[in-house]
């Protein structure tokens, strides 16, 4: 079995993707969303693990935080949560984890060098 080496691909310039926004790129036939999560760039495959929806087309938002019974719900994690456009599944953009399930988004390592955002595929 051949060992396929990873490659780093430049996908954006720093500052090109504003906080809470995204850029879609196609790398080796894969649709990948590059997101700016409060100043940190993250990359996720544009496929929801639930029903294979184009998850990166969903809205970026926050979510309700854990609270004690009887206490008002609190909102937090603004610009960190990606909501799937088909069924509303919520994913943590920083980890890829679903908020209510054990499934997760496929993520890619991201680095920034000389003003460029690079992903490892």
Image (spheres, rainbow, N blue to C red):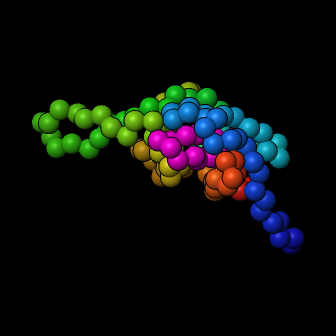
Q: Quadrant of residue 16?
A: top right
- From the viewer's perspective, tell me whether residue 102 is left or right of residue 114: left
Q: Which percent across, then down, holds residue 7?
A: 78, 59
Q: Quadrant of residue 61?
A: top left
Eyeballing the image, is 65 above or below 95?
above
- From the viewer's perspective, tell me whether residue 26 is left or right of residue 114: right
Quarter of the rendering occupied by the C terminus: bottom right
Q: Which percent across, then down, holds residue 98?
A: 48, 46
Residue 20 shows in this picture? yes
Residue appearing at x 83%, y 70% in the figure:
3
Q: Relative to the observer, which residue lies in front, 78 or 90? A: 78
Residue 53 shows in this picture? no
Main SS of residues in magenta: strand
Q: Quadrant of residue 23?
A: top right
- Report the number of numbered marks: 0
**Which residue lies most toward the front here?**
114
Q: Which percent across, then down, holds residue 107?
A: 61, 51
Residue appearing at x 75%, y 48% in the figure:
10
Q: Relative to the observer, which residue lies in front, 103 or 71? A: 71
Magenta segment boundaries in residue numbering:
34-48
Residue appearing at x 86%, y 72% in the figure:
1
**Which residue lies most toward the left here?**
70
Residue appearing at x 15%, y 40% in the figure:
69
Residue 38 in magenta stretch: yes
Residue 113 in magenta stretch: no
């Amino acid at each position: 079995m051949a060992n396929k080496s990873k490659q780093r691909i430049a996908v954006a310039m720093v500052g090109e993707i504003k906080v809470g926004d995204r850029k879609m790129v196609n790398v080796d036939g894969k649709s990948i969303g590059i997101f700016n999560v409060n100043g940190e760039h993250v990359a996720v495959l544009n496929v929801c693990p639930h029903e294979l929806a184009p998850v990166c087309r969903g809205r970026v938002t926050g979510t309700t935080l854990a609270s004690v019974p009887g206490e008002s719900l609190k909102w937090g994690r603004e610009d960190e949560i990606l909501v799937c456009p088909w069924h509303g599944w919520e994913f943590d953009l920083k980890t890829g984890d679903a908020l209510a399930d054990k499934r997760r988004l496929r993520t890619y390592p991201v680095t920034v060098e000389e003003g460029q955002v690079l992903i490892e595929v």
